[in-house]
Image: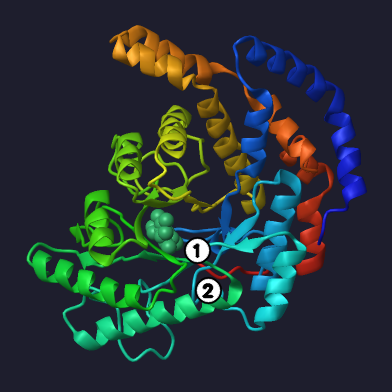
Amino acid sequence: MRIDKSRLDDANKKDEARHKDHFDFLSNQLTMKGCDVESILKKLSDFQVAIPSWALGAGGTRFGRFGFQGEPSNLEQKIDDVGILHTLTKTAGAISLHIPWDVPKDYSAIKELANSHDIIFDAVNSNTFQDQKNAKESYRFGSLSNTNRSVREQAIQHNTEVIQIGDKLGSKSLTIWLADGSNFPGQSNFQTALQHTEDSLKDIYKTLPNDWKLFIEYKPYEPNFYSTVIQDWGTSFMLANACGDKAYTLVDLGHHLPNTNIEQIVSTLMLKGKLGGFHFNDSKYGDDDSTVGSVKPYSLFLIFNALVYGMENNPQNPYPAWMIDASHNIKDPLEDLIQSLEAIQEAYAKALLVDQKLLTGAQQNHDVVKCQEILQDAYRTDVRPLLEKARLESGGAINPINAYRSLQVRENLIDERGTDSVASGL
Ligand code: LRH
Ligand code: MN
Ligand code: MN
């Protein structure tokens, strides 16, 4: 289904007067403080976040999965769903595919479909954490780190095939996340596992087209519960350096032990020009993959403050690839993604309000109180009217959740796809 522009305009009419009132008030306040509102609006509309093809259906846990009616059951329907998100939010202009969950059958038809929704193909993701049908070797004891050469070769080969698939779609990056590790002390030799991983990554890197990037994702635990080969940003950074200039670290917000200072990691990586990609989600305990900003919105703001600083001051770092990596066990996945997109834009807008010059001055004067005041003044500002304005000017919805509900998008999807469609993925 596609959202009809005139119906969206009608939905917006209900919110228009309130929006104008709120925006005018905020815009005056910000202008009086010396903010350039127009430039903030432009940055907000330019900010696009890729939607992972695996987040469009209901996720699950090892204890069970509760399906969601009207889920997309093929790649075409997933792209249509991202189209819906993009029409409403104007922030979801890209999709990220996981291979082999979402291998296109007809490449030109898929590209045409994505194009018709104004969607591009962001990073492609390889999967060596599950055994694939008819595969010769098993990843039970690891993939790129496996002690068995033919398992490593199969995993390397899979990654080069993923690059070829991405290349046909216009993707420009490959994300590798390895589940490799061990479950029990003594099971694996840390040095051998790391060396094999580095050698395998270098083999994959050799096959990367010149204008591509390789993103190396890290994670401290799960599915392995004793050790993970690429457990932290330092290991990823080291491996990226060993591969070369086109290799970068990818930060997934859920892949840190509790209370890790992620904004500091972001700053270090950007200073060294090695922050390549970003996976947004939120968590209370571990890799919970909850809605972005639902648990720790202040942390998200502090991370964005580091990102904005890096984007403005670190020309050595490429513009990062943004993606949501979340899973929705009980919510409507599309509503959840709309909430995530809103939280991302909100944290970004707040970070853009931080007066960096004033902050640097306060830091140099060791005025600790002032430093905190500057950050919290930005954080406490209700920036939602800015988001509404940016969306409205790009042709989206003033309030995407309200529009989604009043246009009965889910009901229409259920009519089209039925009540028991099932999405592929986790
Ligand atoms: C691992 C991860 C990684 C995978 C995705 C499905 O936890 O974050 O990015 O590709 O989840
Ligand atoms: Mn991830
Ligand atoms: Mn994860």
Residue 85 visible in the picture: yes
Residue in the picture at 34% in, 51% down:
274
Residue 189 visible in the picture: no
Which corner quadrant holds the N terminus? bottom right
Please, what is the three-letter code of the amino acid marked with disc 1? Ala
Labelled disc at residue 123: 1
Q: Which corner quadrant of the image does residue 387 belong to?
A: top right
Q: Position of residue 317 (x, y in %)?
A: 40, 47
Q: How is the image coloured?
A: rainbow
Front in this rendered view, residue 379 or 287: 379
* Ligand 3 quadrant in view: bottom left
Alpha carbons under labels 1 and 2: distance apart: 8 Å
Residue in the picture at 31% in, 10% down:
368
Q: Position of residue 198 (x, y in %)?
A: 21, 69
Whether label 1 touches label 2, CB < 8 Å? yes
Please, what is the three-letter code of the amino acid marked with disc 2? Gly
